[in-house]
Amino acid sequence: MRDHEVAVLRLGHRPGRDNRMTTHVGLTARALGADRVVLTGNATRSRETIEDITDRFGGPFVVEQTEEPKRVVREFPGAVVHLTMYGLPVQDVERDVRADHRAGPLLIVVGAEKVPFDVYERADWNVAVTNQPHSEVAGLAVFLDRLFEGRELDWEWEGATHRVVPKATGKRVEPVDPVDSSNGDE
């Protein structure tokens, strides 16, 4: 069972350059247990893709856009976690972050470009998933898995029209309520 809301803020979006990465931040947030993602700037293509995946593979999951990301951070009613390679190691703070999440909502800030210093100051936790350069998608995935202690891997999705059928080899996607005999094998 989930504690309080988990939101992910994708701080920054450079059209053309960040489309795929912003989309993957949103999809990772959804797949690994967040309740919503807030995209900044002109991330309409990413928003549409994430909403399409949510419509097909289930939710609940909300996608929002804002032109005021600093306001989102400043006014968030719970704890703020900023994922940065300059932060404290996730393995050293995960219990305390988890305790904050049990007490109230959690905002996870994932940067795209240079993060303003006031985000570091506002964050209750500046958290590093390794102090080496890496993908923000990888950092978000590891952090969410640590936050939920792997429970998110077994959560059920509501309202899905399609589902992936696990297979040792090959790919199979099928309608949740099969109407025809096609099985989606490739």
Image (tube, rainbow, N blue to C red):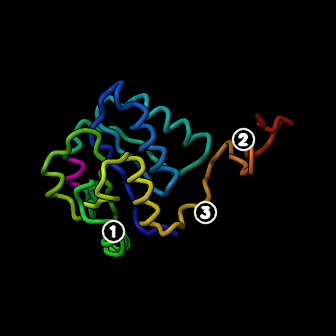
User: Is most of the magenta stretch helix, strand or loop?
Assistant: helix
Give the Cα separation between the discs numbered 2 and 1.
39 Å
Circle 1 Cα neighbour tier, 10 Å, few/some/many (<14 / 14–19 / ≥20)? some
Q: Report the residue marked by disc 1.
A: 104
Q: Is mark 1 on a helix, strand or loop?
A: loop
Name the residue located 54 percent from the left edge and 35 percent from the top edge: 52
Which secondary structure lies at badge 2?
A: loop
Question: Is the C terminus in the top left, top right, bottom left or bottom right quadrant?
Answer: top right
Task: Tell me if label 1 and label 3 are in contact, CB under 8 Å.
Answer: no
Q: Identify the residue position indicated by label 2 in the image.
A: 171
- Name the foreground residue: 186 vs 76: 186
Question: Nearer the viewer's eye, disc 2 or disc 3?
Answer: 2
Crowd around label 2: few <14 · some 14–19 · many ≥20 (10 Å): few
Q: Position of residue 123 (x, y in %)?
A: 21, 59
Q: What stretch is highlighted in magenta?
A: 71-75
Q: Nearer the viewer, mark 2 or mark 1?
A: 2
The mark that comes first in sequence, 2 or 3, is 3
Q: Name the residue under label 3.
A: 154
Q: In which quarter of the image is residue 63?
A: top left
- Image x and y of residue 98, in percent: 37, 71
CB of mark 2 within 8 Å of CB of mark 3?
no
